[in-house]
Image (tube, grey):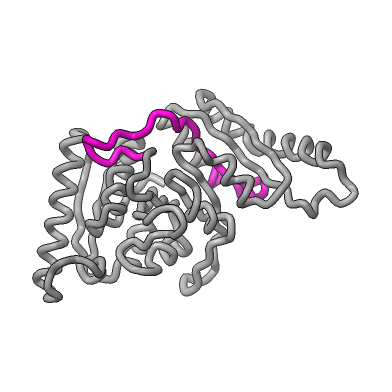
Amino acid sequence: MTGPVVVGLDGSPASVTAAWWAAREAVDRRRPLVLLHSWTTQPLDVPIAQEARSKQRYGREVLERASAELLHRHGDLALTTELVSVPATHALLERGENASMLVLGSLGHGSVASFLLGSISLHVLGLTSCPTVAVRAGDPVVEAGWDHPAAADRNEVVVGLQEPGPAADPLLEFAFTSAATRGTRLQAVRALPLTSLANRREGDLEAEERVRLAETLAPWREKFPDVPVTKHVATGPATQVLLTASTRGCLTVVGRRRHPSQLTWKLGPVAHAALHHVPSPVAVVPHD
């Protein structure tokens, strides 16, 4: 998608880290950046009165402070801000219809953060029509201020593929583009369930799956010839295989099937596990 990078910013450390990650991504992808703040959906610990005017003033201050820092760091960044009165979930889902990606803050290992309040992140991640990235506060992969440079030892984008084939194309497009903009390698991960070993030898099955995975990757390797690619096929629980493969990644990409109803959201167990435990930003990409 060719739209802007949109980040939900509430002033919390997680959302500020997400804004720094989103700014770098926008510059690398040559996309405009939109900082979005919903003044009607703010953190519960904001030390301000509950009057609407005070909430709006807090929102403007959050946007102005982040804008100044990001423009000072990235002089060529095309940045706009939006202070909205609609609930954050509605605003983000609406912007996601035309965005290249949404970026949200996350609390850290063990629990998925909310952007702003409780279940907002999960609803957005489960319903949005564009890729959505969750970024943790203090993530060593992310440059988050002049005194917090990005770690230099994370040098690959990891993409987990539930099933090789056309359904994987949205994930691979996002993952290959991310690797190309970063100048890093890509690791494609495929987990085989233990039940698939019935009457089969593990080595034979994994060899066959490597061939299928190579065929799925072939057109994307041709489109991105400068991106080095490795393949990881292993038998075992998908969450365990992906988490093991992602320990040194700078970005992990997982998929989510689109739901026919915008009233129901659903993230699969692998996406949930990645959002809780992968030690890097996690992108959830919707696909058919």
- Residue 122 point in image, percent of width and height: 44, 64
**Extreme residue toward the top, this view:** 226
Label count reads: 0
Q: Is residue 195 magenta?
A: no
Please provide the residue range marked out in magenta.
Answer: 142-171
**Which residue is rendered at x = 38% and y = 60% of the image?**
113
Viewer-proximal residue among 189 and 43: 43
The image quarter containing residue 128 is bottom left
The image quarter containing residue 12 is bottom left
**Quadrant containing the C terminus in the rendered view:** bottom right
- Residue 259 point in image, percent of width and height: 54, 66
Viewer-proximal residue among 104 and 213: 104
**Which residue is rendered at x = 29% and y = 57% of the image?**
8
Viewer-proximal residue among 69 and 109: 109
**Which residue is rendered at x = 73% and y = 45% of the image?**
235
Magenta stretch, overall SS: loop
Left or right, 191 with reference to 23 = right
**Extreme residue toward the right, this view:** 199
Q: In the figure, 94 relative to 283: above or below?
A: below
- Residue 283 point in image, percent of width and height: 46, 49
Q: Is residue 146 magenta?
A: yes
- Residue 193 point in image, percent of width and height: 74, 52
**Extreme residue toward the front, this view:** 110
Q: In the figure, 169 relative to 62: above or below?
A: above
**Which residue is rendered at x = 23% and y = 67% of the image?**
45
Viewer-proximal residue among 222 and 182: 182
Q: In the figure, 79 relative to 116: above or below?
A: above
Left or right, 40 with reference to 193 = left
